[in-house]
Image (cartoon, rainbow, N blue to C red):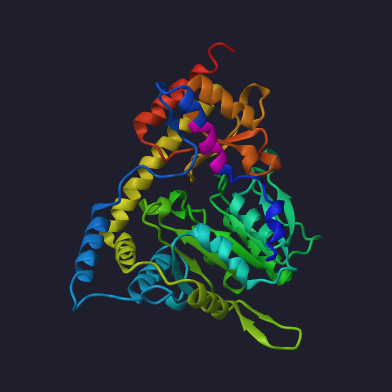
Amino acid sequence: MAKFNERFLDLKESYLFSEVAKRVSTFKEKNPDRDVIRLGIGDVTLPLGKSVVQAMHSAADEMGKAETFRGYGPEQGYDFLRVAIAGHYKEIGADVDADEIFVSDGAKSDTGNITDLFSADNTVLIPDPVYPVYVDTNTMNGRNIVYMNGTAENDFLPMPDRGVHVDIIYLCSPNNPTGACYNKQQLKEWVDYALENDAVILFDSAYESFISDSELPRTIYCIEGAKKCAVEFCSLSKTAGFTGTRCGYTIVPKAIKSVTDDGREMSLNKMWNRRQTTKFNGVPYVVQRAAEAVFSEEGQRESKAMTACYLENARIISDTMNELGIRYTGGINSPYIWFECPFGMDSWTFFDYMLEKAGVVGTPGAGFGKNGDRWFRLTAFNNKENTIEAMKRFRGLFENK
């Protein structure tokens, strides 16, 4: 009999967002006439930009002609897109070589798949609360996980404990779920810690486009030494509405290396390239042409306008929290608002309460770790009209309390 990976038994029975969807579906079945506003799962609502759609149409037309048809593409991504991404990094203050950029179907896939490159006996440092994929993928591989506590007292931005040695460090800034964002000094401490421990930072920057404060870093590579220890993941899902189109990219610097016990040098960049060429056939040509358009002058205008709409929704939610005196983080340089559950409720109790009383869906903080048990996440990815209505209903929860 084939033996299955028993580490899957260590996972929670269902993925967080699957449980959210299940509870909402049950509610809708019992209350078919109730209007539900979803501010939970971070899916976007605005359509792709016109320049992006036009690029997709043009690429599709190319695929319909023998002289311009494309078959298998490079697993690393087409050069035209890798060069465009490198140009974007230069604009936000970092030098990244095109051959350090690997195009993929999204940051979620890559933050999980990157674990293929590391030995199972590495110790992994993960913040709590945290995006569940970081925990689940390492649990599947049987790694030792050490948690660092994100709390209101440290603004949900935990810093390194130099008395603890780890090998792999997960950071996300702006953070999902808390919306908190590391500044340059804080990231420098993390880079220094990683270098001292010969550790690798896995830096999730999927929400970098929401940073409006010019003093905050949009990439870890603007920090001295980061290219020696940090892999960066980014995505066009929220930046340009690609949640259904699927395109992201991972930066694996050539400077990140290790030496085996018998003295052989290993390059993480070469290993990731080998992994991708073995297990990945690349992102479709049509999608990569669309992604290239995102980095054009017109595409950047469209993306920034899209981001501004979501940040306006975040402001509406933040203003409501301020009005009601509810403690929260995020909402300024992030599309997420992370607030303390009212009425002394735990997060799943408040989830059910808000769904029943207000018809509004959010995400319980407990799904992101023990430190989120009495916190709650709302997203700014609905439209403005629904966000205003949701906050009207939210304020109504307090009228009879």
Q: Position of residue 43 (x, y in %)?
A: 43, 44
Q: Residue furthest front?
A: 1
Q: Position of residue 198 (x, y in %)?
A: 71, 72
Q: Position of residue 145 (x, y in %)?
A: 73, 57
**Residue range of the region highlighted in magenta in the rendering:** 18-25
Instruction: Tally the numbered discs.
Output: 0
> In the image, is 377 to the left or to the right of 142?
left
Taking the spot 48% from the left edge, 32% from the top edge, the residue there is 25
Q: Decide: is 123 above or below 23.
A: below
Say if residue 128 shows up in the picture: yes
Foreground: 16 or 203? 16
Look at the image and tell me in which quarter the C terminus lies: top right
Say if residue 326 shows up in the picture: no
Taking the spot 45% from the left edge, 76% from the top edge, the residue there is 97
Foreground: 349 or 88? 349
Magenta stretch contains residue 277: no
Q: Position of residue 202 (x, y in %)?
A: 60, 63
> In the image, is 329 to the left or to the right of 345?
left
Q: Residue furthest right?
A: 163
Residue 178, picture quadrant: top right
Foreground: 216 or 396? 396
Taking the spot 39% from the left edge, 77% from the top edge, the residue there is 74
Per the picture, the main secondary structure of the magenta-coloured stretch is helix
Q: Residue furthest top?
A: 400
Taking the spot 71% from the left edge, 68% from the top edge, the residue there is 120
Q: Decide: is 262 above or below 157.
A: below
Look at the image and tell me in which quarter the N terminus lies: bottom right
